[in-house]
Image (cartoon, rainbow, N blue to C red):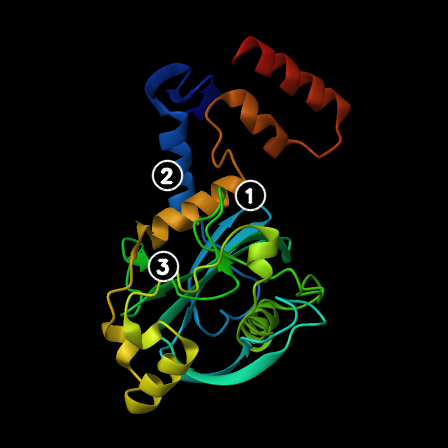
Amino acid sequence: MDLRIEIAGDRAVCKQDGKEAFSVGLQEFLKAVVEQADYLSLPDAIPEGVCFIRRRRGVVVLVIEEKPLVRTVRWLADDSPAPFGPGAVYRPARLAFPFGIVMVALHHGALTNFQQCFYRTSPLRSLSDPLFLPNLLNVADTPAQKCWLCLVNMHKDLTALTWPQRVAEIRKHFWGAGFNRSSEAHEGNSYWQRSAVDPRVATVAAWERESQRDPFFPLHLPWRPAGKTVGQAIEEMMRAVCPNPRPTVAAELVPLLVPAGNPAARRLWLAAKASGK
């Protein structure tokens, strides 16, 4: 028995002894192939704190969950002569935080400027879990990202590191670099005081006092919904950095089947693309 699978246009056709036995849409066929594949999401151990990993070609979106803790952070002083940069002055602040959700898109291990920070009042359990707006400096509402996280001053080259090391560097910078108004200079107004949902977090001094009294009080505050789930946020970031996730017609499969830089293959692909096959 001669059994073959042929791809023509947007269909995958199974032929037995030269005759069509059945056919399915190309996207449905490729989805089934992917579901049967066995591969590692990352070449290294899953980094500490990572809840979800989405990978598409050279792009990886990581969802990092920070546990609710009282943390000593560097917060921009009220009398700081500069809003950020070398002239900025900070003061230590011991603050209680809810669950922090840091989402970062990396291309071949490097930052892409697509990174966000949200809050949650319970641990992540599924992609349908909703996200909440934070009350942080360094996080801003932008046209491209609802909760853009400023990592502009993170100058370390992440490409030479392992995945656990990359995540460790991101987390260290997030908590240790200092909360300032850099996001307002680069993108837009930060969420600090825009998300003052309760008098207990209306000022840093009030936040500190309540943190000392009740380390877990942020888990019970009415944080404002971000209007999206963790799965939707991942998809938005992936689509922005690496669009066209799955081939829809036969022509789009050609680059996957031939060596890169093959002139004959490229001519074939361009001809098929022009014809719509």
Residues at marks 1 and 3, CA–CA distance in whole angstroms: 23 Å
State the residue at coordinates (34%, 74%). Answer: 201
Q: At label 3, which amino acid type do we have?
A: Leu
State the residue at coordinates (47%, 74%). Answer: 48
Q: Position of residue 212 (x, y in %)?
A: 34, 90
129 vs 52, left or right, is left
Q: Position of residue 170 (x, y in %)?
A: 57, 69
Secondary element at image label 3? loop
Residue at the far top: name it.
275
Q: What residue does disc 3 label?
A: 133
Q: At label 2, which amino acid type do we have?
A: Ala
Q: Is residue 82 above or below residue 253?
A: below
* Residue 32, numbered circle: 2
Secondary element at image label 2? helix
Secondary element at image label 1? helix
Q: Looking at the image, is mark 1 or mark 2 nearer the viewer?
A: 1
Front-most of residues 86 and 21: 86
Q: What residue does disc 1 label?
A: 241
Task: Quadrant for residue 15, please give it.
Answer: top left
Task: Quadrant for residue 88, please give it.
Answer: bottom right
State the residue at coordinates (58%, 16%). Answer: 273
91 vs 32, left or right, is right
10 Å neighbourhood of mark 3: few (<14), some, or many (≥20)? many
Among numbered discs 1 and 2, the one appearing first in the sequence:
2
